[in-house]
Amino acid sequence: MKLARGFCDLNISATDTDLKKTLLKALSLGYQTLAVNREVTDTFAPHQKGKKRKKDDFPVVLPPPKVSLTKEELDRHGISREPVILTRITITYADPGSAFLSKFRNNIKQYDIVAFTPTTDSALKQTVSQTLVDVDIIALGPEERGTRFARKLLRLAVERNIYFELSYGPCITNSTRRQQTITLAHILHHSFRSANIIITSQTNSVLYHLRAREGLSKDYLCGVQQTPNNLALKKLPMPEVQDCPYLHFLEDRTWDLLAVRTLAWVPVLWTSE
Amino acid sequence: MVRFKRRYLVVEVVPESGYIRMNTLHKAVLEAVKRLHGDFGVGAVIPGFGVKYINPETSLAFISTGRGPHRLVASALPFITEVGGRPATVRSLHRAASMRHGFIFLKKYNEEKLKQLEEQLPPREREQLQKEKRKTLGAR
């Protein structure tokens, strides 16, 4: 089991051709734990229920990509700390009755982090309550479903230790995405006081990857307030990140800052620079 | 448990001509918020935002927003110069915590307005109006 260390970015989109380059760039920006994301979309919509699904209608779930970085490559980019590279799969689906999850359960379990993007209310309900696959992250997309999410379901997800993701990458270039991300941040804050939220890059361009120590600016972007003594990070379900030393360090300190409880920026606060 | 609290802004929308519609007012307010507070303002205001009620005769409307972002909306209202392509001004009258309180204020406001208009009428017409009022509302 790989344990997370240092600054984390749990959503790096990279094609298989430039994966190494993107990872080395992210590591040189100060991150130590990265999760390479693979996206899978189940396009079968609920209104097509009457139709029988053929074998080809199911999307293909490839096994996790294997990346190895040699010491020479790390030294060339000035990376002194040993990186932790995790694999992540993000499944976008709309139909809860789809056999996709049970069909590809074994392939999905090979990934370190499993994320879901449900595009309908029924899919969100199934994501939160199903037991076929352990869900770590729910990446809600307001552009797909508008701003109405069932608060009960969001709270149930928090009780089951599922985390919600806010991505800053698309916000940098697109004004509409920026507004939608801020709206989502506010909805999550209203629903459960932003208890289980992580901020990730979701960028496949090295140009838009923020430095690890620019974490505070991501939080002001989301504008969600934090109370000092309620850190949700201690309750992270993912074994890979539970023993991150920075989490324990935070418990002793009290501070007052406008921020979101996140995994990525937490270590920023305790840097003495 | 976190409760989503709202604030209802009672506003008077005075167009140069014609009537204002709910969707045009909705768009105009969001544009003003975007101009003043940017993408953050729009993102913060959208949850819970809506034009809940509009009276085309009296030009009064209710705008609902979440508590907190209601300040952004309230600060943007004076900067609205156009609604639906037509010049208009928006004036905030009251901030209520519920629609019911908003309507209580509206009732008092309308009664005061009616009183002011009555006083401006010549005596004969004033008497006629009071007769009609007694007929409609019953003796008070």
Image (cartoon, coloured by chain):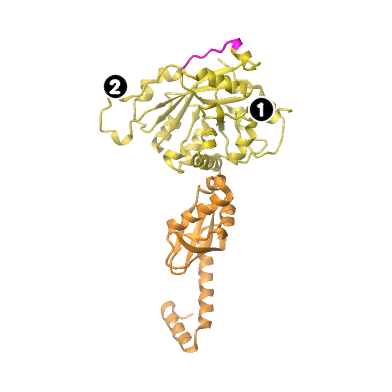
Q: Nearer the viewer, residue B16 or A3?
A: B16
The residue at which mark 1 appears reads as A267
Q: Earlier in the sequence, mark 2 or mark 1?
A: 2
Which segment is the magenta one? A65-72
The residue at which mark 2 appears reads as A55
Residue A14 painted magenta: no
Identify the colour of chain A in the image.
yellow
Q: Nearer the viewer, residue A38 or B55?
A: A38
Q: Quadrant of the C terminus of chain A?
A: top right
Q: Position of residue B85 (x, y in %)?
A: 45, 59
Amino acid marked by disc 2:
Lys
Q: Position of residue B140 (x, y in %)?
A: 49, 79
Q: Nearer the viewer, residue B72 or B113?
A: B72
Q: Secondary structure at mark 2?
A: helix
Q: Position of residue A139 (x, y in %)?
A: 48, 32
Q: CA distance from mark 2 to mark 1?
A: 46 Å
| Colour orange maps to chain | B
Asked which quadrant contains residue A44, the reply is top left
Q: Chain of mark 2?
A: A
